[in-house]
Image: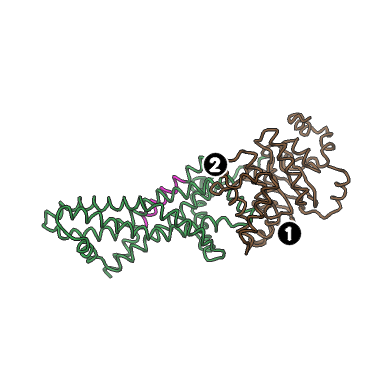
Chain colours: A brown, B green
Amino acid sequence: METTQQHTIMKEEPVISIRGLHKTFGNLKVLKGIDFNLFKGENVAVLGKSGSGKSVLIKIIVGLLKPDKGDVFVLGKQVDKLDRAELDTLRLRIGFSFQNSALYDSMNVYQNLAFPLTMNVKNQSKKDIDDAVNEVLDAVGLKDKINQMPSDLSGGQRKRIGIARTLILKPEIMLYDEPTSGLDPITSAEIIELINEVQQKYNTSSVIITHDLTCAKNTGNRIAMLFGGKFIKDGKFEDVFESDEEHIKGFYNYNFIQ
Amino acid sequence: MKKTKTKKYIFSKGIDDYFTGVNNAWKFVTLFFKEVSKKPFHLREVIHQCFEIGLKSLPLITLTGFIVGIVFTKQSRPSLEDFGATSWLPSLIGIAIVRALGPLVTALICAGKVGSGIGAELGSMKVTEQIEAMEVSAINPFKYLVVTRVLATTITIPLLALYCSFFGLLGSFINVHAQETSSLLTYYQNAFSSISFLDIFASVAKSIAYGFTIGIVGSYKGYNATQGTRGVGKAANQAVVLSMFLIFVEELFFVQISNWIRYF
């Protein structure tokens, strides 16, 4: 998280810009007027307790959920105002890595990776598809798993294939939903390294939703702390956790990072 | 999270939920008709589903159709013997199988085998976020998963019903042949002598309706599954129960309509 890189990033136009975002489920107000920017080339880690609305935030960004109030601009497009075709065009520029990987169980690794490509890119030869699949498998270091079924993969391998599936469409923005949840520390470290490699290699801007401080510290150029439906702190990791705010302190102490 | 004031219901929670459910099901059906005519058609997936639904059901349909033919013949023979009318057996069985038993037995078997399979598969995809994964990959999951499956059941179940009727008549022939010597050709000629074009047409038409019902109910229940693995089981179960119920309602409707046309 170099300071110079941070300054360069901030000069750019935001690739995601959110103003006054509200979202309620039934009687539960999850997001209460959120403002958020993601700049080009930046990794932002969104921290918060389970149920604080972190996943809701990225689902609204990608158009899976509609906001009740507020404006959400992604790559210059107002997400909730797009029709199906326009939203699909925008989604091709966004990669979404699910918490539980969401690999298609009925397809093997090759088919999982080739599926978004064959469905979205016309007139692709078999060789083009094979090359693209091999490239992303190489990027996530799992070339030898090409013919395996998702049920035969470990949790970490599934996460990697899930990330590879999003990379195959060469997204400009990556949204990671709890990328290290349910993984052991060593596998978590590998996923963290992969997130950083993806940013470098594919020049993506990323939002990383997590409650794992190690992940947030090592992937985020900036940390945004979500609590009670609002961002209560936003800044570099050290600045955020220097705060005396009770919830931030509690979060830090609970995670106990070295 | 701060809680807002308690939600008010128009009638009561149960009644409101019922009408919301009916409205959602209606929207689901209309969405199918809206999407079915739009590109892309995913023909390869439709063929794949036809194979999964149709070809893989053939052994079960063959055996069941055959047994139904034998059992129905065995049950009918004593009554006809009392009137010295066993020569009417092929006609009676032909009418019963082509008009009612073939399509109905096929639909009930497919509601159990195919409907539950669709409900469980889509339900499992829903609760494991695979449907959302398709959505964010700019693939229309409704079109790819629902439209293809409903088309496949609508195409294959009428074919399976005709196939089932054929094997039902074959089972009946074997039973008749065991009692009194008769050739297969003569038996089929006798069986079809009482069957009109309207019978075949009505049989195919209702099988199309059954196929559509099985596909759409299974897809609706699976696509809207909630509550994790428990929801998957519930979706599969409800897909079978609701589609079987609707098949009987449709059967009643088709019998009324075809009788009305027949005696008009």
Q: Which residue is mark 1?
A: A77
- Is residue B83 found left or right of B219 in the rendered image? left
Q: Which residues are magenta?
A: B236-250
Q: Which quadrant of the figure has residue A84?
A: bottom right
- Give me the residue at 41% from left, 55% from top: B54
Q: Look at the numbered disc 2 and give the secondary structure of its residue.
A: loop
- Is residue B46 found left or right of B101 in the rendered image? right
- Give me the residue at 41% from left, 59% from top: B156
Query: Could you tell me which chain the residue with mark 1 belongs to?
Result: A
Query: Could you tell me which chain the residue with mark 2 belongs to?
Result: B
Q: Relative to the observer, which residue lies in front, B264 or B73? A: B73
Amino acid at pointer 2: Gln
Q: Relative to the observer, which residue lies in front, B20 or A53? A: A53
Q: Decide if residue B164 is in sight here.
A: yes
Q: Is residue A21 magenta?
A: no
Q: Which residue is mark 2?
A: B227
The x and y percentages for residue B188 are: 23, 62
Amino acid at pointer 1: Lys
1 and 2 marks on the same chain: no
- Is residue B224 found left or right of B259 in the rendered image? right
The x and y percentages for residue B140 are: 59, 57
- Is residue B259 found left or right of A3 in the rendered image? left
The 10 Å Cα crowd at callout 2, few under 14, some 14 to 19, many 20 or more, is: few
The x and y percentages for residue B255 are: 31, 61
Which mark, residue B81?
none
- Quarter of the picture containing the C terminus of chain A is top right
Q: Relative to the observer, which residue lies in front, A152 or A212? A: A152
